[in-house]
Image: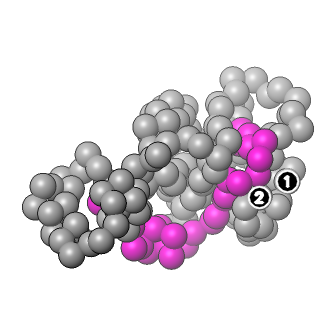
Amino acid sequence: MPELPEVETTRRGVAPWIEGARVAGVDVRQPALRWPVPRAMARELPGRRILAARRRAKYLLFAAEGDRTLMLHLGMSGSLRVLQHPEPPGVHDHLDIALENGRVLRFRDPRRFGSVDWVRGDPLQHPLLCELGPEPLGPDFTPHYLLAACRGRRVSIKQHIMNGRVVVGVGN
């Protein structure tokens, strides 16, 4: 499973290529991932500019014009690539986002545990994100926070910090 460092590396890798780019088209070849890919995304994303590529926990958040966000999770085996020139999709290449500059953002997920959502408004209020704990390298994750979060718990420290409501992105 891509862990938090790999997801952040993916974000940093694709951000320079997609931030500021306008979407020319969306090709959803496999709408049945972990959850169905929203049909509205393929209709509404083309023509919008991608404003920013962010990350919250293991979710990639691509902010688009018009107060919409493409929220993507790589699942167990997913990856994102930026193609300089269109290439024929492979059997596990489930989603392409074609940009007006000729590049393609391609989502590949052999096990189909990944997810794609099309969020209106603040993505941090989405049910999958709103109750998550702080980022492990963020300013809110302090020794005082961790002490308070551990007080009164009866599970092992490993189990406790692997709980995404305590701190996000801590893998096995």
Give the residue type at disc 2.
Answer: Leu
Give the residue type at disc 1.
Answer: Gln
Quarter the N terminus occupies: top right
Q: Is residue 125 magenta?
A: yes
Q: Position of residue 49 (x, y in %)?
A: 57, 50
Q: Nearer the viewer, mark 2 or mark 1?
A: 2
Question: What colouring method underlies this structural image?
Answer: one colour
Say which residue label 1 marks: 30
Few, some or many residues within 10 Å of mark 1 (<14, 14–19, 20+): some
Q: What residue do we see at 88% from left, 29% from top?
A: 88
Magenta highlight range: 106-134
User: Looking at the rendering, which quadrant does residue 158 occupy?
Assistant: bottom left
Whether 79 is drawn above or below 27: the answer is: above
Q: What residue do we see at 83% from left, 26% from top?
A: 87
User: Looking at the rendering, which quadrant does residue 155 occupy?
Assistant: bottom left
Determine whether the residue tagged by mark 1 lies in a helix, strand or loop: loop
In the image: residue 62, left or right of residue 82? left
Q: Residue furthest left?
A: 144
Q: What residue do we see at 51% from left, 54% from top?
A: 59
Q: Residue 33 — which label?
A: 2
Image marks 2 and 1: residues in contact by CB distance under 8 Å:
yes
In the image: residue 45, left or right of residue 121? right
Q: Position of residue 132 (x, y in %)?
A: 39, 67
Tell which of 59 and 19 is nearer to you. Answer: 59
Determine whether the residue tagged by mark 2 lies in a helix, strand or loop: loop
Q: Position of residue 78 (x, y in %)?
A: 67, 42
Q: Is residue 22 magenta?
A: no
Q: Is residue 43 visible?
A: no
Tell which of 106 and 26 is nearer to you. Answer: 106
Few, some or many residues within 10 Å of mark 2 (<14, 14–19, 20+): some
Q: Position of residue 84 (x, y in %)?
A: 69, 23
Q: Is residue 146 visible?
A: yes
